[in-house]
Image: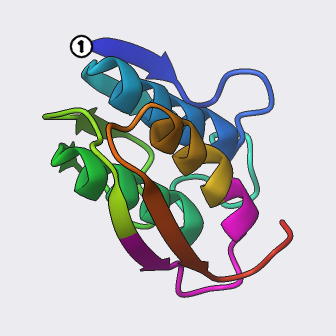
Amino acid sequence: MISIDGGAKSGSGTIVRYSVALASLLGKEIRIDNIRAKRDKPGLRAQHLKVIQACQEMCHGAVGNAVIGSKAITYIPKERFKGGEYCWDIGTAGSTTMMAQTLLPLACFAEKPSKFRLEGGLFQ
C-alpha cells in the first residue's frame, strides 16, 4: 500500500483528488493521512468525499474511513474503469470542475465511452 501525506505543501484537497484518480488508473492501494491538515477546516469536505465515492463506484473499489471530516482514508481500486454513464451530486456548492479534473483522466483510459453528469458548484 502506498502511503501519501495529505498535508504536504499547501495540504489541499488536490492531493486527495489526484491520489485517488492515479490509484484508480494504476490499480494501486493507497492510504492518505493528514488530509487537508493545514486548512482552517481539516479533513474531507463533501466535494472530496464525493470524488472518492465516484472513483470507488467506477472501479468497484473499497474505501476505509471515508466520511466528512476524516483526516485519513484508505482506497483500494478493484478493477479498471470500463466506461459508462454516471451522475453524481456533490450535495453542496463544492466544485464540480475539480471533480471533473479527477474523473476525466479515468475516462480517457476507459475501454468504452463515458458520460458524466455532475451537480454542485462551479468555483472553489
Q: In the rendered view, does 34 fall on the left or right side of 24?
A: right
**Rendered location of residue 99, percent (x, y):** 61, 58
Q: In the rendered view, does 58 fall on the left or right side of 7?
A: left
Image height check: is 33 above or below 27? Answer: below
Quick check: can you spot residue 109? yes
Residue at numbered disc 1: 1
Give the extent of the magenta segment. Answer: 86-98
Quick check: can you spot residue 69? no
Q: Crowding at label 1, few (<14), some or many (≥20) Cα neighbours within 10 Å? A: few
State the count of labels. Answer: 1
Image height check: is 117 above or below 68? Answer: below
**Rendered location of residue 110, percent (x, y):** 38, 38
Q: Residue at x 75, y 80 (%)?
A: 121
Q: Observer-nearest residue: 7 or 107?
A: 107
Instruction: Specify the farthest residue to the top.
Output: 2
Q: Observer-nearest residue: 108 or 78?
A: 108
**Element marked by disc 1:** loop
**Rendered location of residue 94, percent (x, y):** 68, 74
Q: Is residue 34 magenta?
A: no
Q: Quadrant of residue 78?
A: top left
**Quadrant location of the N terminus in the rendered image:** top left
Instruction: Specify the farthest residue to the right.
Output: 123
Q: In the rendered view, does 87 fall on the left or right side of 35?
A: left
**Amino acid bearing label 1:** Met
Q: Residue at x 63, y 40 (%)?
A: 37
Q: Residue at x 29, y 52 (%)?
A: 58
Q: Residue at x 68, y 69 (%)?
A: 96
